[in-house]
Amino acid sequence: MTSPPLISVIIRSMDRPSLSAALESVLAQSWRPVEVLVVPASGRAHQPLPLGPQGIAIELADVPAQPLPRPAAANAGLDRARGEWLIFLDDDDVFLPGHLDKLARALEEHPDAVAAYSDVDLGSLMPTGWCSRHRFEADFDPERLRFENYLPMHAVLFRRRCTQAPADCRFDEDQLLFEDWDFWLQLAEHGRFVRAPGVSARYVVAEDAEASGVFTDHASTLAARSRLWSKWQQRMAPGALAHWMGYVQTLYRRAGTADEALSEARASLDGMRQMLAAREAEIAALTARAHDLHAIVAARDTSLADAAAHAAGLLAVIAARETEIRALTSALEAHLAQGPLRAFHSAWQRRTQ
């Protein structure tokens, strides 16, 4: 049975406190075997590294005791890594559980791909927990990659053979800011990237910091981007510029269509809002009318209750009067049955019978 390929995780370290979390995120991965190669880039003596569990070796790369710029530190990692598959992790970012396993399976399933990448969540670690600010989750588009880098460094697992002859993909040490973008463009010349959807890594930025210098429009950022574009413009094959301009034209047309659709959607939304406002006014009027009707019904109920009480009182009076009449009638009959009026009473009774 063939052993799984060794994955080398290359960490360019400035020996910051966040390195511990980065290392722990690698040690928590399920893929084996893994080697962690920490490249000290600060120029100072580096703190000791922990021992890895079985199947994970952690090593501090032997490099000159001097500050290493980002691309130089990356190349030092490439030179010393032994894995068949390689991935970078900066010392302030982290993998989530299953990250390496997912990327490795994607490379196994697509042997023609030079790299596999996952989605990455950019955000900050707050006292209340993780706060997401942006998510990198796009299908691979080599043309878009010429315009912008949408692949965080620790999202991509790539084949080591791409760094060897004849490909010889290396980090351009003149590109001090967009060295990873330049490297992905080199890799993309030798094959396709396959996406393994789903967030499985975090791009960590300070709570009060900008997302990343590469997303700003600072003069240094613009100059670095212009330098990278100039480099790749010179490397374009004949006819590539025309193809690129056609791609830009397609994007503009799509953007125009999207703007039209957005305008129509906004107009429709405004109409729906007006309709909703009218309906809410109708509901308010009906609610007020219903309130008035409830008040009228309550008043009628009160009047009916008063009338019923008055009728009950009258019935009681009538019953009392009828009792009095019966009593008087009985008394009168008794009086008439006695004395001189007795004969008259008897005659009266016979006459009335």
Image: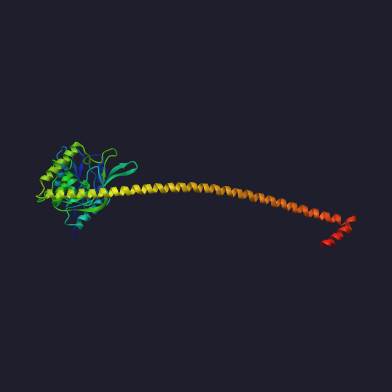
Residue at 84 percent across and 60 percent down: it is 349
Q: Quadrant of residue 172?
A: top left
Residue at 31 percent across and 44 percent down: it is 130
Q: Does 265 sit left or right of 338 as displayed?
A: left
Question: As drawn, which residue projects farthest toward the right?
Answer: 340
On-image quarter of the C terminus: bottom right
Residue at 21 percent across and 49 percent down: it is 253
- Residue 136 appears in view: no
Relative depth, front residue between 86 and 208: 208
Q: Does 165 sit left or right of 13 as displayed?
A: left
- Residue 280 appears in view: yes
Q: Does 119 sit left or right of 305 as displayed?
A: left
Q: Quadrant of residue 203?
A: top left
Q: Position of residue 197 (x, y in %)?
A: 25, 53
Q: Position of residue 121 (x, y in %)?
A: 27, 47
Q: Position of residue 34 (x, y in %)?
A: 21, 51
Q: How is the image coloured?
A: rainbow
Relative depth, front residue between 256 and 78: 256
Q: How many marks?
A: 0
